[in-house]
Image: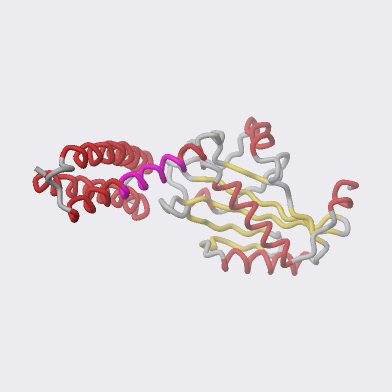
Amino acid sequence: MSRYISPVLYILMMLIGCVAFISIAGVRVGFIEPITAFDMLRKTVLAAIALTILTLVSLFVCRKECSAGGRRFFWLVCVVSFIYSVMWLGLYMQKSKLPDLYDITTDLNNPPVFINMAYLRKASEHDLNYDFSWVPIQKKYYPKIKPLEVSNSFQETYIEAASLVSERGWDMVAQYPSAGVIEATARTPIFGLRNDIVIRITSQNDKVIVDMRSCSRAGESDHGNNAERIQGFLGQLSKRLTPVPDDLVLRN
């Protein structure tokens, strides 16, 4: 019986892999909508769980007639499908606790304004008007998202920020050195979804303030990607510049 079951398990495993690849590649290329791809991927996870159970049952039923090579194949299918399902379930459980936000900013009173991005977005994608009802939600879930205050000059800060944008592989959309504004687009690691970024650099008394806003083009939740992007960027930028000590920031 194992010689009939083995091909079926192999085909099922390949089908799951193909659907997962098509869903991810389809979004990156642009011929599948994200919501459709997410649904396809969710079904592959359910299929992988079912495949794991089916393989264990098959291994038990065929335990007497199955050769050593056959048992190794069963275990391979079982382990691969189990790891695949656990990987996505773990990611889902981690991200499911996050709120339905897709627009994160360091300045909750006066968010940086996008200048060119509205012309690049489709009508079906989110607009760029900031919703101030998100302020208490961001404060609760992302309290560490704050502006970066440095003692470097305005020009030096702008040059370092623009350089870091390029080094991180983001698509530079526009630069306004005199206004202290940088616009760029980043893509998420797996699906390659586009998130638009605006960086605003301003001088205030004897310090320079770097504000940043990152906004997804689609989806009700960014699953924490925009907050991670802002924290990562400003963290790297602070290592290149001279941050204002926390006691001075609090005093001001």
- Name the quadrant of the N terminus: top left
User: Measured from the top left, where is residue 13 in percent x and y?
Assistant: 23, 48
Q: Residue at x 18, y 43 (%)?
A: 63
Q: How many marks?
A: 0
Q: 226 or 119: which is nearer to us?
A: 226
Magenta region, main secondary structure: helix
Among the 4 quarters of the image, the one containing residue 224: top right
User: Measured from the top left, where is residue 53 in percent x and y?
Assistant: 27, 37
> Magenta stretch?
79-91
Q: Residue at x 42, y 52 (%)?
A: 190
User: Measured from the top left, where is residue 196 in percent x and y?
Assistant: 54, 51
Q: Residue at x 28, y 40 (%)?
A: 52
Determine whether, in the image, residue 172 is placed left or right of residue 125. Answer: right
User: Measured from the top left, where is residue 109 in percent x and y?
Assistant: 73, 39
Q: 76 or 249: which is nearer to us?
A: 76
The colour mode here is secondary structure
Determine whether, in the image, residue 34 is placed left or right of residue 186. Answer: left
Q: Indicate whether residue 86 is drawn in magenta.
A: yes
Q: 248 or 42: which is nearer to us?
A: 42
Among the 4 quarters of the image, the one containing residue 208: bottom right
Q: Indicate whether residue 132 is drawn in magenta.
A: no
Residue 25 drawn above or below residue 160: above
